[in-house]
Image: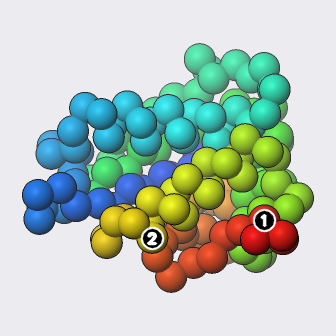
Amino acid sequence: MSDARSIAFTLKARIGGHEVTPETIGLHMFNRFNRQVEELIAGTGKVVALDEATVSIGPGSYKLLVVLPALVMSHLQPDLHRLERGQSLRDLDDRRAVIIKQWQQRAREEEGFSVEISGNAVGKGSIRVSRETDYHMPDE
């Protein structure tokens, strides 16, 4: 995944005591997670050509690899950098903040649940939403 427009969204979760993989992910979880990734990429009120984004499923827990058109990436990347720098959602696109909060809440409720966003578009590290993180709005 060396393309600068590539992002990996890795879901770690457990169902029935077993780790979710591309082979074992349930249809509901598959659809929900993929829809959340799509909404996070699109953001609020933006009309983006996501038909031009390409996806593949990678090995690991459940990893969705996305290569975005340059225009879409230019709208998403500033928020990815904000997420990488801190856990305040104040300056994030509203829809993206909602998705991060949903993942954060789920991580608090379900042991072993986390989402990692990584790739060249993110920066040097990765963004991880887990039970240990505290993504929040400033008034929370």
Residue drawn 78% across and 20% down?
47
How far across and how far down the image is residue 135, in percent? 67, 70
Residue 112 picture quarter? bottom left
* Foreground of the two, 5 or 90: 90
Give the SS element for disc 2.
helix
**Dot 1: element:** loop
Above or below, comparing residue 73 to residue 88 in the picture: above
Q: Is residue 127 left or right of residue 42?
A: left
| Mark 1 nearby-residue class (10 Å; few <14, some 14–19, many ≥20) | some
Residue 82 placement (x, y as % from top left):
80, 65
Q: Is residue 107 visible?
A: yes
User: Which residue is denoted by mark 2 in the rendering?
Assistant: 108
Judge the density around disc 2: few (<14), some (14-19), many (≥20) Cα neighbours within 10 Å.
some
Q: Compared to 70, does 125 lie above or below?
A: below
Residue at 62% in and 56% down: 100
Looking at this rendering, what residue extends furthest in the bottom direction? 132
Question: Which residue sits at x=39%, y=66%?
Answer: 109
Colour convention of the picture: rainbow
- Percent of width and height locating residue 134: 63, 76
Q: Which mark is residue 6?
A: none
Q: Name the residue type under label 1.
A: Met
Residue 68: image quadrant is top right
Separation (CA) of disc 1 from disc 2: 16 Å
Instruction: Kindly identify which numbered label has been placed on residue 137.
Output: 1
The reply to whether the C-beta atoms of the residues labelled 1 and 2 are less than 8 Å apart is no
Does the rendering let one see residue 82?
no
Mark nearer the N terminus (1 vs 2): 2
**Which residue shows up at 64% across the image and 42% down it?**
40
| Mark 2 residue type | Arg
Which quadrant of the rendered structure holds the C terminus? Answer: bottom right
Of all residues shown, which one is farthest toward the front? 140
